[in-house]
C-alpha cells in the first residue's frame, strides 16, 4: 500500500482508496448505493439532508458519509437496521415540512425526494404539524421559486456560489424559519441572479423550476387568427429524446420536426439558420475591430446568462460584447420583418416560439432591447411535456424536414450548442474570408472539450489570432480577471452553463458530466454528416443578404440583427 493510500472495509469488503476519499465515494466503489439529497460531486458538501448516514463499527456512531473522510482501518456498515431506520426517519422529517402536491408539481417526474420516499417504502407521513409558510417568487420570466417545497439541501447555493460564482441566493433566517433565497429576503428580480437555471438543474424537488408557458403557446396555436412559427436551438435535438427514455445524445432532429408539425405549428424553422447568420455578422464585427483598432477582445453574445453576468459584475467590459443579437433573437427579428413581408403576414398576427435548452432565454426574449422579437421561449423540458400532452409517439414518427428558407443551416451552426462551438464556427468562416483560401481541416480541436478555459492561437494569413473559450460563469470570472491582469486575446467565447447550451438550465435531467459529453458527441456527429459545414456557404444565408440584408454589417443588418446592453447593479 502506497503512502497516499488507505485501507478500509465497507460491509466486510476490503477496499484500498486514496487519502481524502469520503465514505460515500468509497461505498460507491464497493457498489453500494447510498441515498443522498444534498450531495453534489466535487462541490463543498454540508451534510444537510442526513440521508447518507452509515455506521462506524468500532464506535457505533452514525455519520454522514458525504462529508466523512475514510480513515485507515475503518470498518463501515451501510445497511444495518439502525442505519435504515434512521435514514427513513430523517426522510420522514423532511417530508413533514414539505408541500406534498406531487400530481401537479412541475418536477414530479424528476423529483429525487419522491423517488427516495418510494425507495425507502414510505407510505404515510406520520409527523403532522405546523409547516413553514413562504411566499412564491414569480418575479422573473425565467424561474419559479416555491420555498415551501425547499428541503434546505443547499445544492442551489453550492452551484450558484461555487460553479457560477454569482452568489445570488443564500440561506436566510434560523431554525423553522430558514429559507434559501436572495439576500435580505429579496426576490430574484431584485438580485444579481443571471437566470441561468443551474439551481433548478440540481434542485432535488420542485422548489426551483422554469417558468412554464406551455398553455400560452397552446392558446396561440388554437387561435385561427394567429400564424404560429417555431424555431429549435441546436442543443435541443440531442437532448429531447431523454424525455422519452432514450440515451443522451440520441439525435431526433427529424422526429422533432414532425412532432412540432403535429402539435400545430404553421411553420417549423431552425435557430441554426440564424446561428449561421450570427457567424456572418459577428465575424464581420471581429474583422472590423481588428482592422480599425477598436475595442478588443470581442466577446460573444449568444448566451443571455453570460451577458447578464457581465452587466452585473463586469460592466467595464460592456463594449467588448459583440453587438450581435443571439441566434434566438436574430431569428425573431428576421421572422417579424423579412418572413412576414415575404408571406404577407401581419406582425400582429405572427407568433414566434422558440425551443431552447436555456431558462435565461425566457428573460432574453422579454428584454426591452429585443423589441418583442420572440413571443415565447420554451425549454427542452417544456417541449417534451407538450408532446406528451398531445399524445404524440415521437420516437416512432417519420423524419420531417425543416421549412425553407429559415430552416436550412450548416454543420457549423449545430456545434453552437456546445462549448467552443461558436468559436470553431467563427474560425471556419473567418479563415476563408480573410485568406480567400479554402480551409482544408475544418475541425479546430484545440477549442473543443470539457476544460473550463481553453486557449488557442490560429494563424490566419499574416495574423495570429489569439482566442479563448470559457464555459460556466466561475470560469468566465477567472478568464475576465486574467484579461484585467493583461492577458491578450482577439476573440473570446463565453457560455453561462457548464458544457455550453447542452448543459443548459432547461435541458432534461440529470445534467451529469456523462450526459453532457454524450450530447456534445451528438452535435459533432451532426456537423460531420452535414453536406455544408461552413456558415458562409449556406445558400439561404446568401439569399437573405441578396434579397434583404444587403451584406454583413450593413445598415439594415445593424437595424435588425444588432442591439446594445446595459449596466446593472450587484
Image (cartoon, helix red, strand yellow):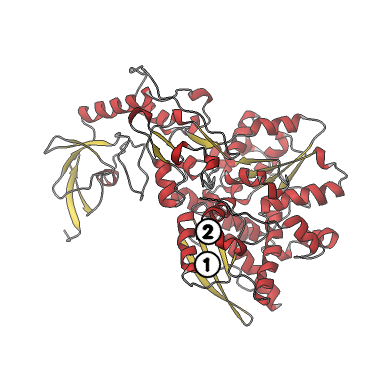
Q: Earlier in the sequence, mark 2 or mark 1?
A: 2
Residue drawn where x is 68% and y is 55% of the image: 325
Q: Which corner quadrant of the image does residue 78 belong to? A: top left
Q: Position of residue 97 (x, y in %)?
A: 38, 24
Judged by depth in the image, the label closer to the viewer, 2 or 1, is 2
Label of residue 468 in the image: 1
Q: Secondary structure at mark 2?
A: loop
> Tag count in the figure?
2
Label of residue 314 in the image: 2
Q: Position of residue 526 (x, y in %)?
A: 61, 55
Does residue 110 show up? yes
Q: Identify the image quadrant of the N terminus.
A: bottom left
The reply, left or right, for residue 167 in relation to residue 359 is: left
Q: Nearer the viewer, residue 364 or 15?
A: 364
Q: Which corner quadrant of the image does residue 287 belong to? A: bottom right
Q: Position of residue 36 (x, y in %)?
A: 34, 37
Q: Secondary structure at mark 1?
A: strand
Q: Is residue 399 above or below residue 179?
A: below
The reply, left or right, for residue 152 in relation to residue 415 is: left
Residue drawn where x is 71% and y is 64% of the image: 280
Residue drawn where x is 52% and y is 67% of the image: 468
Say few, some or many: other residues with alpha carbon within 10 Å of mark 1 (under 14 / 14 to 19 / 20 or more). many
Q: Nearer the viewer, residue 133 or 7?
A: 133
Q: Is residue 161 above or below residue 182?
A: below
Say few, some or many: other residues with alpha carbon within 10 Å of mark 2 (under 14 / 14 to 19 / 20 or more). some
The reply, left or right, for residue 368 in relation to residue 483 is: right
Does residue 120 show up? no
Amino acid at each position: 500500500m502506497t503512502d497516499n493510500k488507505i485501507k478500509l472495509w465497507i460491509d466486510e469488503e476490503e477496499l484500498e482508496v486514496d487519502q481524502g476519499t469520503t465514505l460515500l465515494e468509497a461505498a460507491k466503489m464497493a457498489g453500494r448505493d447510498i441515498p443522498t439529497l444534498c450531495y453534489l460531486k466535487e462541490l463543498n458538501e454540508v451534510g444537510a439532508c442526513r440521508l447518507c448516514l452509515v455506521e462506524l463499527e468500532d464506535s457505533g456512531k452514525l455519520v454522514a458519509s458525504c462529508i466523512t473522510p475514510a480513515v485507515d482501518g475503518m470498518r463501515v456498515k451501510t445497511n444495518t437496521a439502525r442505519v435504515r431506520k434512521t435514514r427513513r426517519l430523517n426522510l420522514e422529517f423532511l417530508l413533514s415540512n414539505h408541500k406534498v402536491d406531487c400530481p401537479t408539481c412541475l418536477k414530479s417526474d424528476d423529483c429525487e425526494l419522491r423517488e427516495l420516499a418510494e425507495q425507502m417504502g414510505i407510505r404515510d407521513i406520520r409527523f403532522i404539524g405546523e409547516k413553514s409558510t413562504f411566499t412564491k417568487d414569480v418575479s422573473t420570466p425565467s424561474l419559479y421559486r416555491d420555498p415551501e417545497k425547499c428541503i434546505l439541501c443547499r445544492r442551489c447555493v453550492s452551484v450558484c456560489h461555487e460553479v457560477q460564482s454569482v452568489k445570488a441566493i443564500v440561506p436566510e433566517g434560523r431554525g423553522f424559519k430558514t429559507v434559501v433565497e436572495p439576500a435580505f429576503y429579496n426576490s430574484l428580480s431584485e438580485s444579481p441572479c443571471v437566470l441561468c437555471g443551474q439551481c433548478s438543474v440540481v434542485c432535488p424537488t420542485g422548489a426551483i423550476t422554469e417558468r412554464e408557458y406551455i398553455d400560452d403557446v397552446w392558446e396561440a396555436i388554437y387561435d385561427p387568427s394567429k400564424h404560429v412559427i417555431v424555431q429549435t436551438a441546436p442543443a435541443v435535438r440531442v437532448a429531447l429524446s431523454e424525455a422519452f427514455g432514450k440515451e443522451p445524445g440520441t439525435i431526433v432532429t427529424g422526429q422533432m420536426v414532425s412532432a412540432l408539425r403535429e402539435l400545430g405549428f404553421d411553420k417549423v424553422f431552425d435557430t441554426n439558420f440564424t446561428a449561421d447568420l450570427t457567424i456572418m455578422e459577428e465575424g464581420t464585427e471581429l474583422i472590423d475591430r481588428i482592422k480599425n483598432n477598436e475595442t478588443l477582445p470581442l466577446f460573444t453574445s449568444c448566451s443571455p446568462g453570460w451577458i447578464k453576468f457581465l452587466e452585473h459584475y463586469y460592466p467595464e467590459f460592456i463594449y467588448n460584447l459583440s453587438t450581435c443579437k443571439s441566434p434566438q433573437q436574430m431569428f425573431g427579428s428576421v421572422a417579424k420583418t423579412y418572413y412576414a413581408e415575404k408571406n404577407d403576414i401581419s406582425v400582429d398576427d405572427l407568433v414566434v416560439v422558440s425551443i431552447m435548452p436555456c431558462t435565461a432565454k425566457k428573460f432574453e426574449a422579454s428584454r426591452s432591447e429585443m423589441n418583442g422579437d420572440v413571443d415565447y421561449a420554451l425549454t427542452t423540458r417544456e417541449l417534451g411535456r407538450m408532446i406528451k400532452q398531445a399524445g404524440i409517439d415521437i420516437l416512432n414518427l417519420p423524419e420531417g424536414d425543416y421549412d425553407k428558407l429559415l430552416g436550412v443551416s450548416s454543420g457549423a451552426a449545430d456545434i453552437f450548442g456546445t462549448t467552443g462551438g461558436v468559436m470553431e464556427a467563427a474560425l471556419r468562416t473567418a479563415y476563408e474570408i480573410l485568406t480567400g483560401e479554402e480551409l482544408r481541416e475544418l475541425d479546430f480541436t484545440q477549442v473543443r472539450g470539457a476544460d473550463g478555459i481553453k486557449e488557442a492561437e490560429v494563424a490566419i494569413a499574416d495574423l495570429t489570432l489569439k482566442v479563448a473559450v470559457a464555459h460556466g460563469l466561475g470560469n468566465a470570472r477567472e478568464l475576465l480577471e486574467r484579461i484585467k491582469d493583461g492577458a491578450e486575446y482577439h476573440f473570446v467565447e463565453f457560455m453561462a452553463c457548464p458544457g455550453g447550451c447542452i448543459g443548459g438550465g432547461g435541458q432534461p435531467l440529470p445534467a451529469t458530466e456523462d450526459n453532457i459529453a454524450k450530447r456534445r458527441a451528438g452535435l459533432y456527429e451532426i456537423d460531420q454528416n452535414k453536406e455544408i459545414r461552413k456558415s458562409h456557404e449556406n445558400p439561404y444565408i446568401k439569399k437573405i443578404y441578396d434579397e434583404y440584408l444587403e451584406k454583413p454589417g450593413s445598415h439594415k443588418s445593424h437595424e435588425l440583427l444588432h442591439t446594445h446592453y446595459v449596466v446593472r447593479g450587484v
